[in-house]
Every structure is written in C-alpha cells, then in structure tokens.
Amino acid sequence: MTLSFSKTEFEGVIIIESDLHQDERGFFKEVYHSDKYKDLGEVFIQDNHSNSKKGVVRGLHYQLNKPQGKLVTAITGEIFDVAVDIRVGSPTFGKWIGLHLSAMNKKQIFIPEGFAHGFCVLSDSADVLYKCTDLYDFEDEYSLLWSDSKVNIDWPFSKPLVSKKDSQAPVLDQIPEKLLPVYKQ
C-alpha cells in the first residue's frame, strides 16, 4: 500500500491518505504500518478509542511534561478534527487547523506534540481511534477552552455538548506561559 503525506502550514501537522482496496465484500485499508509511518519520526505507545454522539465537542486537550503526538482516524461517522498551535514562540502560535475525518474519506491527521487537540462529531455518532506517542497522564493533562474567541475556531455547531471540565477550561491568554509548550526549531 502507498501513503500520501501532505504537509500543512503548521510545522509537523500532516494529512495522510492511503490506498483503499474495495470490492463487493467491502474494503481493506492499512491504518498503521510502522515501516511506512517511520518518516513521521514518531513511536506510538498508546492507542485510544472514543465514541461520541452528534454535536459533542471533545477537547481541546494537551499534555505538557509528557506531550503526546497523535495520529487520528475516524473509523465510523464523521468528525471535524482540530489542532491549535500553543507552542510559545511558534510562528503559528494561537492559530488552528481543522480537517474533516470520516469513515467515507478515510483520511488521517498527525498532530505533533505542542498542539491542543479536539474534535466535534458531525454524524449521528462517530468512533475515533488515535495513536499516541506518550502515555496518558491525568495529572499532566491541560485544556484550552474550545470556544476561545481569540483562537476563533469555526466549529460546525454553536451549542455543542461539552463536558463540564472542557467548558471550564481557560482561554489561551489566561494560560500561564509556564503551562504551555515551547516551540523548538
């Protein structure tokens, strides 16, 4: 199988598409192959699976001391996946990128360390798989308010279903610099 890696304006954020073998029985697609993904320069050590219903926003989350790069795939339904550059000193600090990931388009996105990540479910429900470069650590998890007006993400819902924790997250301007990752050139 061949992979197509498309760089974005955000250093390290990559859109990934791969071959799909389809016939009357359905389809087969490699979701991950360590040799083919080695150009990302990442080793994935934890896999997560979330299921959410329409209108749910999860995020925007990041870890500071044990940062996680994430390879994200929607295996059922459709999501609007978002990464916000929160690396102090980055030329794209405070800017975001969004991508529709779905069971139909079969795209993936790699989000490197130093970005806050979240998504919104567009279909009746969605199952999302993401491979992480470090283990989840509850005590190292931080959040950015999903609706921060200065970041100004163009979410597809104005009144999504959001967890209490995510609805009380600070805006980027209120997060102390010591709690943000630093851009490394």
Image (spheres, helix red, strand yellow):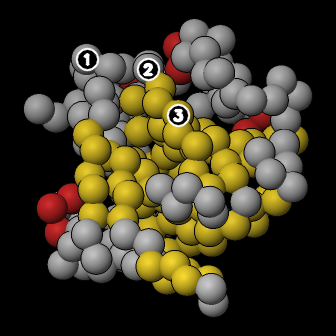
Residue at x 58% of width, y 43% of height: 100
Question: Where on the picture, by quarter, is residue 8?
Answer: top left
Residue 91, label in figure:
1
Q: Locate residue 29 relative to residue 8 in the image: left or right.
A: right
- Quick check: 67 above or below 144? below
Q: Amino acid at mark 3?
A: Gly
Q: How would you rate the neighbour count of disc 2 (Cα within 10 Å): few for under 14, some for 14-19, many for 20 or more?
A: some
Give SS at disc 3: strand
- Mark toward the viewer: 3 or 1: 3
- Mark toward the viewer: 3 or 2: 3
- Quick check: 37 above or below 85? below
Question: Where on the picture, by quarter, is residue 87?
Answer: top left
- Kindly report the distance in space between the C-alpha atoms of the residues bearing marks 3 and 2: 10 Å
Q: Position of residue 147 (x, y in %)?
A: 70, 23
- Kindly report the distance in space between the C-alpha atoms of the residues bearing marks 2 and 1: 9 Å
Residue 98, label in figure:
3
- Residue farthest toward the bottom in the current orientation of the protein: 25
Q: Amino acid at mark 1?
A: Pro
Q: How would you rate the neighbour count of disc 3 (Cα within 10 Å): few for under 14, some for 14-19, many for 20 or more?
A: some
- Residue farthest toward the left in the current orientation of the protein: 185
User: Looking at the image, can residue 42 be seen?
Assistant: yes
Give SS at disc 1: loop
Q: Which residue is mark 2?
A: 95
